[in-house]
Image: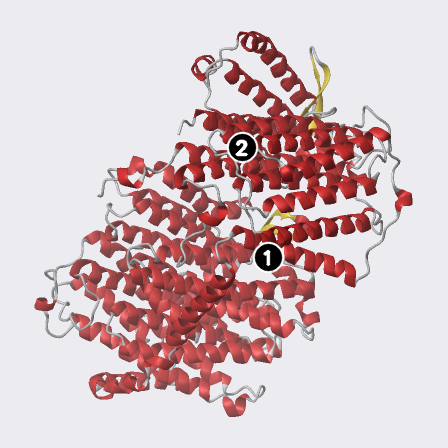
């Protein structure tokens, strides 16, 4: 199972990288979103999969699944949501003011 | 003792409140309100003088990061008492003075906020026992000094001076930090008291010498010792109350404090003795020599401050030799140098504070500090003149002022040091009295410049913008109090010695038994002895030199301005700016794609390369958990969805595919026993998709990417390589079990945190700090979104030029 | 945002309350079962957003006169102040504590400072989320 998931993570990372390297701003944002998906899966996989019960002490018996990666991912999900929201708005506000969503055209003046 | 913590905290609290409350002080000057703080602190501290004098110390620890040995430990002993009294005492007078110096039109709330910030930081420096905490406060004084020097930030010279002071003191501070860390490596403690008590075991340690030099670097940069003194004259761009407070009475003395505090740690070493005393001596001479040539009175005082700081520093160096001999009747003689240092420290704050305030008065009332435009002010400004006269004569070391006493003790210390027969002092020791004497002659000359050129002679009203008149009484109160102290200390020096200096002596020499023995009886007259003869010589030669000043002044022209330390500093700064500009321009070409390629290629090369180089790759399928058919289906769905995103024709399709990925991951979270994650992921994914759709109404649809084939190939290769590296690293790491997982600790969540949901117990309790900051990040992102949308600037053409 | 969808409006009026209840339940149960500040806040926020979607903004503003920026700010303040609160009691920053009490109706109940902290988290999430979505949707330009 782990091997399978890691392969999937590899595919997600490759796709995300390709999206991020493009010029269109929406592709880049989508790329970061896919990237965070991949990373969440990666963190979870590193804590061993399906070894133990739900980490709820009253509901299940030991052994429990590793709770620490889960806590980390929970934090990561919320942060990546915040970042996505922020750059989305940044992107469209830039578009409104500058009139392009092409990053190659957005580079600053030469002598800055 | 709680009140010591409070003493540090109060200035910060009031500083934090100022921006909210200053509007209530429209009618009265904000300074009156702020003045309460230092006065109250001074009273609190003064009430502790008797118990500190009897040898009591106050320690209070608040654990901050106990695992790293960082604790807010405040420690009040004799040495910190001296500095704390100076900080609050001079602080009160300076704030009183500033009320009349700064008009209500200035942005007073900033000024007093910075000033209180400084006061709190400075108190933190002298009260901290923990080196890391001390360092934080130390840098905070640099920051607040920066803000205060640049208070009139429309002036270019102010900004330049502020930057210079900041760069030099902060780099010294960083050196000091490294020294502190070395001390911790050696002794295993950040507490100064513990280091002092255990240091004797480590004097042969390999890090002993580097730590000493680094700590001294911090002290020397802060106290403007040669060759780091160059920042202090430029710092005089600050408003005069600031110069009087930070750059003569308190902040520049932080270096002195550090040296005094670390004397028991490093003082028994020969290098310490030589470095501290010789650097002090050079600074003493160089400062006084340069002060004579200044025409700006404030610059003159700046160099004189440098010189006097050098004097105190060299005295501390001379005093450290007593630690060589250990405690005996003979070595007590050498401790008198330290006593003189602390004594002069106080004296210097009194007379130099008064002089700075006088110069501030001249600047404020007459509009100039240039000695060439002044003259004959005595008859017009009798009170100012009196204060100036007292301050100058005290600085020159004449009776009946306190400067005389400490200057005599300084001469005595340099004479005594010749009699020591270690460290090759019998042959080299002679330089101390000689340099001290020459420097004192120059000191006498520049003191004469202040008195004679500014206040005596013929008035030159035609060179002044404003008519000559006496300053308002309010501005005169503070300098007069200081001048009274100057005279008062001369007549009652032993009162000061017994209550203030004596307990400090036992902080510098903790192994030296009773502090009473270390406290000499100060008296103005002790017969004809070498130091008295030296003083008389200073007066005679100084008077002659002053008389013929214009004949030998051309000497200063010999020093080319190209080879000064100032030029070195400017060149260093300019070239580092241009060099880094060139380098930055080389690779920062404004294309996001290139930046990302740097990052990805770096990742591939370092991580992938290391994996290959160290042969760390391992792969073992046997430890894998079993999988079911539907799980494989899910993986396949995600893989297909991800790949199709690359070929999606519209952004809507791509977004929905991203949603597919998100929801599939939520299902995986369920399979992998993570219900909290699954719930969160489900909701977040829905909201994210909604956000994308909302934002799309403001964005154009994407066009098919028209990238050159080469670019596409490069992108593809990089992407696949990144993915491959991640897979390889992931496969190698997943079976790694060299360390015990720490998660079992959290399984006691119910006992430790009272929660049965381990994940939430970690979030809310074990790692609550992370969650708190995460909430802050979320909030910042929200604010960012809100302000980007709602608070947009007006379009340029709508701007009306003002 | 004007959607004149009768079905959506009718259903959402009921659904919103179910979601709100569910959000509160998730928030409160987070200590021992799945849930907690984040997820509770997220669910509450989506309920409020649904409210805005189904009826127009003006109506909701009248019946729910809250500035969500302040909600978020209060949340952050609450979360951080529980951290600083521990300093007052002389224990390290961010120490949480809990105790069991016998309350009249609820029986043996656990009260903990984490709940205050989590409430801060939930408020922040609600405030930020609603602020973001409202800002974008109100942005005409």
Please say if the residues under marks 1 and 2 sit with CB atoms less than 8 Å apart: no
B609 or B464: nearer the eye? B609
State which mark lies toward you, 1 or 2.
Answer: 1
B30 or B273: nearer the eye? B30
Q: Which residue is mark 1?
A: B598
Q: Is residue C10 above or below residue B125?
A: above
Q: Chain of mark 1?
A: B
Q: Residue at x 26, y 59 (%)?
A: B480
Residue furthest to the right:
B622
Q: CA distance from mark 1 to mark 2?
A: 37 Å
Secondary structure of residue under mark 2: helix
Q: Is residue B75 visible?
A: no
Identify the disc placed on residue C76: 2
Q: Crowdedness of circle 2 by 10 Å Cα count: few (<14), some, many (20+)? A: many
Classify the position of the C terminus of chain B by image quarter.
top left
Q: Residue B684 at x, y = what percent?
A: 63, 29
Dividing the picture into quadrants, the one containing residue C129 is: top right
Q: Residue at x 29, y 70 (%)?
A: B299
Would residue C116 appear left or right of A5 to someone viewing this image? left
Q: Residue B121 at x, y = what percent?
A: 47, 53
Identify the disc placed on residue B360: none
Q: Is residue B428 above or below residue A71?
A: below
Q: Crowdedness of circle 1 by 10 Å Cα count: few (<14), some, many (20+)? A: few
Q: Is residue B718 visible?
A: yes
Q: Is residue C28 above or below residue A35?
A: above
> Are the numbered discs 1 and 2 placed on the same chain, yes or no?
no
Q: Residue B636 at x, y = what percent?
A: 77, 34
B675 or C140: nearer the eye? C140
Would residue B627 appear left or right of B94 to someone viewing this image? right
């Amino acid at each position: 199972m782990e091997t399978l998931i890691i392969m999937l993570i590899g595919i997600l990372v490759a796709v995300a990288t390709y999206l991020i390297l493009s010029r269109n701003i929406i592709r880049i944002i989508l790329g970061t979103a896919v990237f965070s998906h991949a990373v969440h899966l990666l963190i979870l996989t590193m804590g061993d999969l399906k070894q133990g019960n739900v980490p709820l002490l009253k509901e299940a018996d030991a052994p429990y699944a590793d709770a620490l990666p889960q806590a980390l991912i929970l934090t990561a999900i919320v942060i990546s949501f915040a970042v996505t929201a922020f750059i989305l708005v940044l992107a469209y506000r830039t578009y409104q003011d500058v009139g392009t969503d092409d990053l190659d055209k957005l580079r600053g003046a030469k002598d800055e | 003792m709680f009140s010591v913590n409070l003493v540090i905290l109060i200035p910060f609290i009031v500083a934090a409140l100022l921006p909210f409350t200053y509007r209530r002080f429209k009618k009265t000057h904000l300074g009156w309100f702020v003045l309460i703080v230092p006065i109250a602190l001074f009273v609190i501290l003064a009430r502790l003088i008797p118990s500190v004098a009897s040898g009591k110390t106050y320690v209070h620890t608040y654990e901050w990061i106990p695992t790293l040995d960082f604790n807010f430990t405040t420690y009040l002993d004799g040495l910190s008492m001296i500095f704390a009294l100076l900080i609050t005492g001079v602080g009160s007078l300076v704030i009183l003075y500033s009320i009349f110096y700064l008009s209500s039109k200035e942005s007073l709330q900033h000024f007093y906020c910075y000033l209180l910030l400084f006061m709190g930081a400075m108190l933190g420096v002298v009260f901290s026992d923990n080196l890391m905490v001390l360092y934080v406060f130390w840098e905070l004084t640099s920051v607040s000094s920066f803000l205060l020097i640049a208070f009139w930030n429309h002036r270019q010279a102010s900004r330049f001076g502020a930057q210079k002071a900041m760069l030099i003191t902060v780099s010294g501070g960083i050196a000091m930090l490294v020294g502190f860390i070395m001390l911790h490596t050696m002794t295993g403690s950040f507490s100064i008291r513990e280091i002092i008590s255990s240091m004797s075991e480590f004097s042969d340690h390999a890090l002993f010498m580097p730590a000493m030099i680094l700590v001294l670097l911090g002290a020397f940069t802060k106290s403007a010792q040669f060759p780091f003194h160059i920042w202090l004259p430029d710092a005089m761009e600050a408003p005069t109350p600031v110069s009087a407070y930070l750059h003569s009475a308190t902040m520049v003395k932080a270096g002195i404090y550090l040296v005094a505090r670390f004397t028991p740690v490093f003082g028994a070493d020969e290098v310490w003795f030589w470095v501290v005393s010789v650097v002090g001596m050079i600074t003493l001479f160089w400062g006084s020599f340069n002060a004579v040539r200044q025409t700006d009175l404030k610059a003159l005082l700046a160099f004189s401050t440098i010189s006097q700081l050098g004097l105190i520093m060299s005295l501390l160096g001379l005093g450290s030799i007593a630690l060589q001999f250990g405690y005996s009747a003979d070595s007590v003689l050498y401790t008198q140098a330290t006593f003189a240092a602390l004594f002069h420290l106080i004296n210097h704050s009194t007379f130099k504070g008064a002089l700075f305030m006088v110069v501030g008065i001249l600047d404020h009332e007459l509009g100039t500090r240039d000695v060439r435009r002044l003259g004959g002010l005595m008859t017009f400004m009798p009170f100012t003149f009196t204060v100036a006269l007292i301050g100058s004569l005290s600085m020159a070391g004449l009776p009946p002022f306190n400067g005389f006493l400490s200057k005599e003790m300084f001469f005595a210390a340099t004479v005594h040091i010749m009699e020591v027969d270690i460290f090759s002092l019998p042959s080299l020791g002679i330089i101390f009295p000689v340099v001290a004497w020459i420097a004192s002659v120059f000191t006498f000359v520049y003191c004469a410049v202040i008195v004679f050129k500014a206040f005596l002679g013929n008035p030159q009203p035609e060179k002044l913008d404003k008519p000559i008149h006496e300053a308002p009484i309010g501005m005169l109160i503070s300098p007069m109090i200081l001048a009274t102290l100057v005279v008062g200390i001369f007549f009652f020096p032993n009162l000061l010695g017994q209550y203030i200096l004596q307990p400090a002596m036992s902080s510098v020499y903790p192994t030296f038994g009773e502090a009473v023995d270390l406290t000499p009886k100060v008296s103005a007259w002790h017969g004809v002895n070498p130091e008295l003869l030296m003083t008389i010589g200073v007066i005679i030669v100084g008077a002659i030199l002053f008389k013929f000043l214009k004949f030998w002044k051309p000497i200063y022209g010999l020093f080319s301005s190209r080879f000064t330390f100032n030029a070195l500093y400017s060149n260093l700064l300019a070239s580092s700016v241009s060099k880094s500009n060139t380098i930055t321009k080389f690779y920062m070409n404004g294309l996001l794609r290139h930046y990302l390629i740097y990052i990805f290629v770096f990742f591939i090369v370092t991580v992938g390369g290391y994996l290959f180089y160290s042969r760390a790759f391992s792969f073992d399928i046997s430890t894998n958990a079993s999988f079911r058919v539907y799980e494989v289906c899910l993986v396949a769905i995600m893989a297909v969805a991800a790949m199709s995103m690359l070929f999606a024709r519209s952004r809507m399709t791509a977004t929905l595919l991203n949603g597919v990925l998100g929801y599939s991951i939520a299902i995986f979270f369920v399979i992998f026993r993570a219900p909290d994650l699954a719930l969160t992921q489900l909701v977040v994914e829905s909201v994210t998709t909604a956000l994308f759709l909302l934002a799309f109404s403001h964005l154009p649809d994407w066009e098919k990417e028209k990238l050159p084939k080469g670019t596409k190939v490069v992108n593809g290769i990089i992407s696949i390589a990144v993915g491959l590296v991640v897979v390889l690293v992931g496969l190698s790491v997943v079976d790694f079990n060299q360390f015990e997982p720490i998660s079992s600790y959290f399984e006691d969540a119910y006992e430790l945190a009272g929660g049965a949901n381990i994940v939430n117990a970690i979030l809310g309790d074990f790692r609550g700090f992370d969650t708190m900051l995460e909430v802050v990040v979320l909030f910042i992102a929200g604010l960012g979104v809100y302000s980007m949308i709602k608070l947009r600037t007006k379009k340029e053409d709508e701007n009306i030029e003002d | 945002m004007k959607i004149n969808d009768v079905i959506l409006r009718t259903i959402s009026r009921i659904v919103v309350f179910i979601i709100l209840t569910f959000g509160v339940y998730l928030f409160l149960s987070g200590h021992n079962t799945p849930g907690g500040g984040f997820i509770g806040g997220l669910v509450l926020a989506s309920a409020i957003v649904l409210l805005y979607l189904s009826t127009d903004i003006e109506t909701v503003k009248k019946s729910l006169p809250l500035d969500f920026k302040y909600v978020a700010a209060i949340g952050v303040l609450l979360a951080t102040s529980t951290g600083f609160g521990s300093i007052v009691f002389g224990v390290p920053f961010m120490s949480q504590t809990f105790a069991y009490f016998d309350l009249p109706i609820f029986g043996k109940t656990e009260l903990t400072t984490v709940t205050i902290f989590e409430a801060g988290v939930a408020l922040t999430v609600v405030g930020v989320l609603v602020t973001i979505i409202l800002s974008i949707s109100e942005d005409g330009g």
